[in-house]
Every structure is written in C-alpha cells, then in structure tokens.
Image (tube, rainbow, N blue to C red):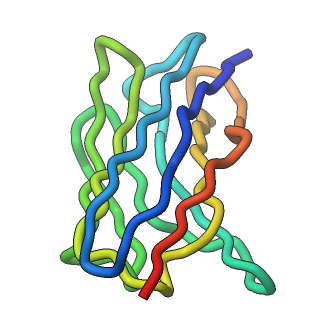
C-alpha cells in the first residue's frame, strides 16, 4: 500500500504564490498517476492537475496557465506550484496517487488547506 505525506498549505493574498508537495511512500511505477484535487466549501471535489512519470500532464480548466505540476520520480514526490492565486482557489487540496496497470490502488492524502484572501 502507498502512504502519502502532505506538508501544510498556507494562506496568501490574491496574486500571491504557494507551493504544495506530496511524498509517496510505497511502490510507484511509470504508469502511476500522481496529482492534486481540491474541494471548496459547498462544492464538489475537482481536478487541479495530474502527471505521470513520463511527464505527461493534465490540468483543470480553472488553473490552466497559473498552476504547474511537477514530479520527482526518484523521490516519489509531486509538487504543485500555484501562481496568481485567486480567492476562488481557496479550498482543501488533496494529493492523489493511483495505479491500475502494475498494481491496483487509489490513495488520497489527508488534505491541506489553502486560503487566498482578497
């Protein structure tokens, strides 16, 4: 089984930047998808960004051009650089790791709060 460690998010004013990280302890593979999702109060959880080992990335429409996901395969760690933050980016950000080819698992981090003030 894979375990995820997400250090804390933070608070920032609109227009500012934050960087999230998530380290996975366990067996990851080239096909393993690492990513971030978020959930704002009263809203459904939504995609922020995902990445696989080759570097192929996918972004949610709300963050395209502002956020950048990256992955250090040697450290089994995924990062999310968030720039030009808006109050609408406020929410709990969840790290996710899923694998459906070599093994089968879908693991979520405990979530970290990101607050953007206007």
Residue in view at x 48 percent, y 41 percent: 33
Location of the N terminus by quadrant is top right
Residue 74 relative to residue 25: left or right: left
Location of the C terminus by quadrant is bottom left
Residue in view at x 28 percent, y 53 percent: 81
Q: Nearer the viewer, residue 111 or 12?
A: 12
Q: How many marks?
A: 0
Residue 31 relative to residue 92: left or right: left
- Residue 80 location (% of width, % of height): 35, 50
In the displayed structure, 2 sits above or below 18; it is above
Residue in view at x 60 percent, y 26 percent: 5
Which image quarter: residue 3? top right
- Residue 110 location (% of width, % of height): 73, 40
Residue in view at x 47 percent, y 80 percent: 117
Q: Nearer the viewer, residue 19 or 60?
A: 19
In the displayed structure, 59 sits above or below 50; it is below
In the displayed structure, 102 sits above or below 25; it is below
Q: Which of 91 and 70 is in front in this view?
A: 91
Most extreme residue toward the right is 42
- Residue 112 location (% of width, % of height): 62, 49
Which image quarter: residue 25? top right
In the displayed structure, 80 sits above or below 52; it is below
């Amino acid at each position: 089984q894979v375990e995820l460690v997400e250090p804390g998010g933070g608070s920032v004013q609109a227009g500012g930047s934050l960087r999230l990280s998530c380290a996975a302890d366990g067996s990851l593979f080239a096909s393993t998808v690492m990513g971030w999702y978020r959930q704002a109060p009263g809203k459904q959880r939504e995609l922020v960004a995902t990445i696989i080992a080759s570097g192929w990335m996918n972004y949610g429409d709300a963050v395209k051009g502002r956020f950048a996901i990256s992955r250090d395969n040697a450290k089994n760690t995924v990062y999310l650089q968030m720039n030009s933050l808006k109050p609408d980016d406020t929410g709990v950000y969840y790290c996710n790791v899923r694998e459906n080819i070599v093994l089968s698992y879908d693991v979520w981090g405990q979530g970290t709060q990101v607050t953007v003030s206007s």
